[in-house]
Amino acid sequence: YYVHLSVTGRCNAKCAGCVNSSVTHYRENDSWLLSVNDTQPERDATAILKLLEGRNESEIVVSFYGGEPLLLPEKMESVVSILSERKHSYDFRYMVYTNGQLLGEAIEKHPNLMARMWLYSVSIDGDREQHNRTRRGTDLDVIHRNLAALRRVRTGPVLMWSTLREDQSLADCFDEFLFLHERGWVDHFFWHWVETDQPFRALGSYMERYERDLDRIMETYLAWLAGGKLLPVAHLNELVIYFLTGKARGSSACAVELARNFDLAGGKVHACADLPPEFAIGTIGDDGEPNLRSVSLSSLVHYKADMGCHECGVHGYCGGRCPVQALTSTAERLVDYCQLMRLHVGTVQRYIPQILRLLPSANLTPQDIYDESAFYAQFTDVTP
């Protein structure tokens, strides 16, 4: 079970196509000025405990989100301290979603906090040229130094998260992952197509490039298996398990419509932090008391009937992908995603017979694939 806590809506970067609602829904303002949504540690820690009451959960992951949460590591530290001091039966783990630019400063000033993180998700979009072009305000050389410093103090794994835009190369992102993984600076990889309302300018040529890059990744996957190792690409391994077991997802990729987890941002409770503000499902009083309204979120996935998702051959895996994209985008862009998802699933499917032949010699079962890699997909956007 996990709770997202938006530490701040502010960010030190201006990444192309940022989807976070605390930034994108205030486009006329500089995101540095949006301090109104900064977490209030006492209020939000109290709300987390109250929201967990009556739930049969013991292991809880609190995910620090933003904006850029490492702008306010002292508030993160306060939340951790309060939850540690309160009397409860929960085993809290902590993760942070960061662009990586401020990791070094956070390690220097808050070493205990950074060492305590159970999982780190760091946004890296390829080689230096590609990354710095799309994630303006960050510098990959600085992030490299920060990851090297983090390796010396961390006890949890690092997940590299790449966001793909039409002019970006998946191969560059994968090569960067291999470079970082070889040095022990990152442990897992995930990529996701940017969520925007703009259709692809040249979908056909992009799909050709994407398929070529994915084929190369899958060939690497086979080579690692032949050597007895699992390539730690979280969502690819989840898809492999889908093919091996045939178990359908049963919801959208992030399951936001089921409201099983909570996102806290600016004194409000959301089913997903990336949904527009009007989709908040409750508020938090100054004393930390949550006030949830009775609301059905099933309308968030009504688009699936219009799109014909239930008749699509990949729906069992993708589940309609992302309700946020459906709500904030256009029909043309959604159809583009559908075509890409079919290509993605179909490409991986071609390699399943070879994967099946190699798994016994690699001494890997579907459960091993889940435990070692696919498990981490739930802490991403799940599907590309």
Image (tube, rainbow, N blue to C red):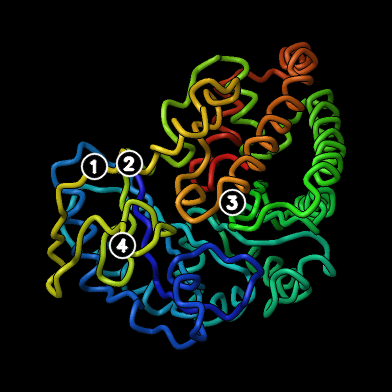
Q: Secondary structure at mark 4?
A: helix
* Amino acid type for the residue under numbered disc 3: Pro
Q: Could you tell me which quadrant the C terminus lies in?
A: top right
Residue 344: quadrant of the picture: top right
Say whether residue 155 is left or right of residue 76: right
Q: CA distance from mark 2 to mark 1?
A: 7 Å
**85 or 267, which is in the foreground?**
267
Residue at x 42%, y 26% (from the top left corner) = 250
Q: Residue 278, which numbered label?
A: 4
> Which label lies toward us, 3 or 4?
4
Mark pair 2, 4: CA separation: 14 Å
- The residue to which callout 2 is attached is 299
**In which quadrant is the N terminus drawn?**
top left
- The amino acid on which the numbered mark 2 sits, given as a three-letter code, is Ser
Count neighbours of disc 2 (C-alpha within 10 A) and say few if under 14, some if 14 to 19, many if 20 or more. few
Q: Residue at x 57, y 60 (%)?
A: 154
Looking at the image, which is closer to me, 224 or 175?
A: 175
Taking 329 as reference, is 57 above or below it? Answer: above
Residue 190, relative to residue 225: is it above or below?
below
- Dot placed on the residue nearer the N-terminal end, 3 or 4: 3
The location of residue 343, given as percent across then percent down, is: 73, 31
Dot 1, crowdedness within 10 Å: few (<14), some or many (≥20)?
few
- Tag 1 residue: 296
